[in-house]
Amino acid sequence: MAEVDWIPRHPKAEDLRVGLISWAGTYLTFEAHKSSVTASAKSLGRRQTWEILVSNEHETQAVIRLKSLQGLYLLCEADGTVCYGRPKTSHHGCFLLRFHRNGKWTFQCIISGRYLESDGEDVFCNSRVLSAYHMWTPRPALHIHVTLYSPTYHSYARADHTVGRIWVDAAVPCLEECGFLLHFQDGCYHLETSTHHFLSHVDRLVPKRSPQTAFHLQVRPRGLVALCDGEGGTLYPQGSHLLLGLGSTPVKGEEWFVLQHFPTWVSLKSKSRKFLSVIYDAEVCAASERLTQMSLFQYECDSETPTLQLRSANGYYLAQRRHRTIIADGHPMESDTFFRVNWNCGKITLQCPNGRFLGIASNGLLMANVTIPGPNEELGIRFANRPFLILRGRYGYVGSSSDHDLLKCNMDQPDCIHLLPCRQGIYHFQGWILLVNNILWHLPPLGEICPQLLYRTSGEQLAHGTGTQWLLPPSGPEWHTIGRQRRNYQRMYLGILGQWDVACQTVNPPGTTSELNRAKDPESQSTRRICAVQFFLPSLAKHLSQVTIHHERLPPRSVCVFDSGNTLPVWL
């Protein structure tokens, strides 16, 4: 089979959604309970997320409709009021979207000619004279972990930490260096690499975020973005080595990048500890003891069923062919490229549509031979490009705040949860900055898995979550140490946050008493109210990570957490 170029998948619908920020810094919001549209929200959430449906686009303008995640459209009525619903005519709800040089957008009603504006709270269409009150700043609503693909050069941005530069020369985004965190702060964006360095205005990677790492973002409805410094400079590939740097003379649209969520790549190992690799451009064989690019597979999940697709670095998908062989020559929608995945303690088995399981033949080739899986059909799986996880739930990112010892899941900016690989597909979670090793997860004993977040301070426990205890290695001076535990293990009580708020009680560490406890004074137990949002699991397409916690002298239990993107279980 001839060598092919890597063809990026078309952006998903969630990659094209945006939030719209008014001149007052508030977001255009779909108010379902009020049957109205406002601009009073201070952060980007589901009700502030809009799909841009483009019917006609030119260089500086486009005819669009704004659609909420509830499936209803933004409508401008004849009296200037703005509501939501379903269009009554072909032009009802259509706006002329203009792209301004400062990165702002304006929306002009096609029927009335009036501009969409806000007073900081209400939204209406009254004026036909353009002013600063009609300007809206688009903010991409996709997951913060992204790739930058240059359609001009057909390559991805890649951070080179040995020289402190970013090059646009990666043909396949299978390396962790191709992933970036796009932080939004004070109206600007900061581009962070996988080693937590930031791109600066002098084209260098620096260790800290500063005004010199702040860029303005030009956004187009079909997922195109351009990064500018606000003083006439634009980031684009330069020179023969395609160095990403600021310049003022981009040609042929080379300053535009396709912004997409960072894909998940994995490696698969056989029972004989050999990596599955694509050889001779198509055959899949367990023969390599070294991890190469042809040993990496993009993990793509179906959102409705427990099936997956594995895409090789040659651009094709693994598929079952004649004589039960597995060949890397499949296409995206081909039925033979879908495999049912079963998880077993850090390993997986893959089942073909005909019911047979993939296994390693005596000659090392990957075949679909058996109907009952055994050790020969189990494959070890590891992340290939995920040094950390960024978790996002229904209401925002998982993170901590400086004023609470509580992990929240409605944060605008996430905390990085670093992955420390161990044996047999096991990962240990290690937090970053405020989370250093203090991440605790809990699985309800019965029912649907809802990983609500979990509380991590010493000497306190949630009032209704006293039944579950775990032993954890000592990792912070603020945790209470149990003197009679081996290896100085520390015992922590884990509770589950309710759907909206919970009560938190101050209790004594196990085995200790106090004068107040002896007196059994009800007022001796201080209770406070914690407002928190439940961390609902998104669909399977939102990157499932199934975690099993292993500690000495305790049976393993599993926990589900999410890093939005492709579905993939991880073992802790």
Image: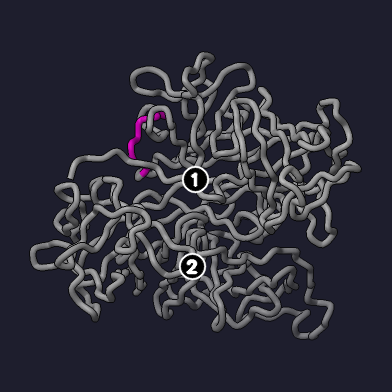
Work out which quarter of the rendered image holds the C terminus and state it. Answer: bottom left
Mark 2 residue element? loop
Residues marked 1 and 2 touching at CB (< 8 Å): no
Residue at mark 1:
11
Residue drawn at x 50%, y 25% as measured from the top left: 255
Position of residue 144 measured from the top left corner of the image (x, y, whole percent):
55, 46
- What segment carries the magenta color? 166-173
- Vertical relation: 184 (above or below) 424: above
Residue at mark 2:
304
Taking the image as shown, residue 32 lies to the left or right of residue 389, namely: right
Residue 269 falls in which quadrant of the image? bottom left
Residue type for callout 2: Glu
Magenta-drawn stretch contains 548: no
Q: Main secondary structure of the magenta part?
A: strand
Viewer-closest of 12 and 20: 12
Magenta-drawn stretch contains 172: yes
Using the numbered discs, state the Cα–Cα distance from disc 1 to disc 2 in whole angstroms: 19 Å
Residue 338 falls in which quadrant of the image? bottom left
Viewer-closest of 306 and 113: 113
Position of residue 101 measured from the top left corner of the image (x, y, whole percent):
66, 22
Residue type for callout 1: Pro
Residue 210: mark: none
Position of residue 489 measured from the top left corner of the image (x, y, whole percent):
48, 71
Mark 1 residue element? loop
- Vertical relation: 181 (above or below) 550: above
Residue drawn at x 80%, y 37% as measured from the top left: 111
